[in-house]
Amino acid sequence: DAGVIQSPRHEVTEMGQEVTLRCKPISGHNSLFWYRQTMMRGLELLIYFNNNVPIDDSGMPEDRFSAKMPNASFSTLKIQPSEPRDSAVYFCASRGPDYEQYFGPGTRLTVT
Amino acid sequence: SQQGEEDPQALSIQEGENATMNCSYKTSINNLQWYRQNSGRGLVHLILIRSNEREKHSGRLRVTLDTSKKSSSLLITASRAADTASYFCATDSGTYKYIFGTGTRLKVLA
């Protein structure tokens, strides 16, 4: 298996633009997590899905953030409009059968 | 504040020495996990210990869990330069919503 796949790996955009981050979890994993990592705040859970259904989105910072999981093999995290304070590394992770999480390589987002 | 707080924040040791890092948490848990993150990469799962376990081994890793003190420790024996990374604990309180700590930055000097 190729592991969790994220795209793009790097994204540089201007304030106000829409940003879409993509994730393909490991096949067979039923839960998917989106995290954000910054030096100041560490690793924050944004939202997680179980069987494609959003279970807890309490970590989503504000209405500018939205996430979808239309099927078991694909999820998106969208920021619209983006702001400089959204600059961070965004990770997607899927959970294996023994509760361990498998992380993707991350998307480094820079909003100027 | 974070559910898991690692201590120390940073640790620098010589190759061959043992490295010990600690994690404290606030609420009761079902299990606790340790992850490693190399610079610029995603986190990698190392080991999971359940709330009814006190100690677990995996290769050069030894994890202990003290639920009465709400703390865990990760010991890496005979450290190598390749162990240089940040290490995080993550707690699951039964909701499958893992809360990650602030991490310990380990540097192993060759």
Image: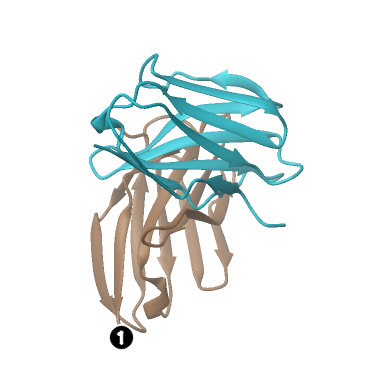
Q: Does B110 sit above or below residue A110?
A: below
Label 1 resides on the chain identified as B
In the picture, residue B109 is in which quadrant? bottom left
Q: Which quadrant of the rendered structure holds the N terminus of chain A?
A: bottom right
- State the residue at coordinates (31%, 32%): A86
State the hue of chain A.
cyan
Q: Which chain is brown?
A: B
Residue A88 visible, this orientation: yes
Q: Nearer the viewer, residue A35 or B81?
A: A35
Q: Position of residue B35 (x, y in %)?
A: 47, 54
Q: Position of residue B15 (x, y in %)?
A: 33, 83
Which residue occupies 56% across, 31% down?
Answer: A76
Residue B51 appears anywhere in the view: no
* Residue B20 place in picture, x, y as percent: 35, 64
Q: Which residue is mark 1?
A: B110
Q: Which quarter of the picture shows residue A82?
A: top left
Image quarter where the C terminus of chain A lies is: top left
Count the marks: how many? 1
Q: Nearer the viewer, residue B13 or B57?
A: B13
In this view of the protein, which residue sits in the foreground, B75 or B87?
A: B87
Q: Does residue B3 appear left or right of residue A70 in this picture?
A: left
Which amino acid, by three-letter code, is at mark 1?
Ala
Alpha-carbon neighbours of circle 1 within 10 Å: few (<14), some, or many (≥20)? few
The residue located at (49%, 46%) in the rendering is A8
Q: Residue at x 42, y 76 (%)?
A: B82
Residue A41 x, y percent position in the rendering? 27, 37
Residue located farthest toward the right when viewing the structure as drawn? A28
Q: Residue furthest top?
A: A63
Instruction: Provide the secondary structure element on which disc 1 rests.
Output: loop
